[in-house]
Image: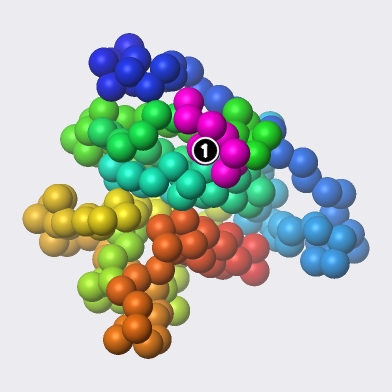
């Protein structure tokens, strides 16, 4: 176990998301009852998580690079469960302890069911994370300076290719690794009134992107 992970009081053991899946209605699109649409591309599941039909690993991944505010981490953890067991990756160092009651409170009693993965550094994540060499995955880096709008992004929908959504921290975004992103998919969220606001909230941004990826998979 690394010093970073030990300091957080966490182990690297993989925690499986156990989320409730409502029984599908006719057509699988009864939104009023809380049932999420699950087309044939989302038919592969393992312990409640939407997984790749190729290797049975989770299909959706959210990455927070050096997050600073516990509320955002707790909020997106809850969303990851609700959307079907998306994996949450936190790349350290992070600015708070995951044992803090604020994190647990933001994630409510669902926090222990989050499929959480901790990484000592960006280099560690790149080498061993979901789009490591040999894995079938597409990564997307979200920044207000992204060349492509989320409105125009077409995520892979073959049910095999992992979708990895990467977000920077609340203060500096992805600035610290910007020089490594030259040939990556850089995406911006549509935002009006930029003279009134600098950016969206981090967990809000991640939720918007995660749900759009799910929507495209569910079509």
Q: Residues within 10 Å of mark 1 (few under 14, many from 20)?
A: some
Camera sees residue 56: no
Percent position (x, y) of residue 191? 39, 81
Left or right relative to 62: residue 59: right
Please name the residue shown 33% across and 44% down the image.
Answer: 68
In this picture, is 23 found above or below 3? below
Say which of 135 and 68 sits in front. Answer: 68
177 sits left or right of 205 in the view: left
Prevalent SS, magenta region? helix
User: Can you identify the residue that label 1 sits on?
Assistant: 102
Q: Residue furthest left?
A: 179
Residue farthest to the front, as pictured: 101
Name the foreground residue: 62 vs 195.
Answer: 195
Which of the pair 168/171 is nearer the observer?
171
In the image, which residues are magenta?
Answer: 99-107
SS state under label 1: helix
Q: Is residue 30 visible in the rendered structure shown here?
A: yes
- Give the vertical position of 9 relative to 205 (above or below): above
Locate residue 144, reporting x and y percent.
28, 71
Residue at 30% in and 59% down = 141
Q: Against 46, is 174 above or below?
A: below
């Amino acid at each position: 176990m690394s010093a970073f992970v030990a300091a957080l009081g966490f182990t690297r053991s993989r925690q499986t998301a156990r989320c409730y899946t409502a029984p599908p209605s006719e057509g699988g699109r009864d939104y009023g009852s809380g049932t999420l649409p699950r087309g044939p591309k989302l038919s592969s599941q393992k312990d409640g998580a939407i997984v790749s039909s190729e290797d049975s690993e989770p299909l959706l991944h959210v990455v927070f690079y050096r997050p600073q505010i516990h509320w955002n981490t707790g909020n997106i953890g809850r969303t990851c469960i609700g959307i079907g067991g998306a994996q949450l990756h936190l790349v350290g160092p992070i600015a708070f302890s995951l044992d803090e009651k604020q994190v647990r409170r933001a994630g409510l009693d669902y926090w222990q069911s989050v499929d959480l993965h901790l990484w000592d550094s960006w280099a560690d994540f790149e080498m061993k994370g979901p789009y490591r060499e040999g894995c079938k995955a597409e990564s997307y880096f979200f920044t207000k300076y992204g060349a492509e709008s989320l409105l125009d992004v077409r995520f892979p929908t073959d049910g095999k290719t992992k979708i990895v959504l990467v977000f920077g921290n609340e203060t500096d975004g992805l600035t610290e690794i910007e020089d490594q992103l030259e040939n990556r998919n850089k995406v911006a969220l549509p935002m009006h009134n930029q003279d009134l606001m600098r950016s969206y909230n981090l967990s809000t941004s991640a939720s918007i992107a995660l749900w759009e990826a799910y929507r495209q998979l569910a079509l």
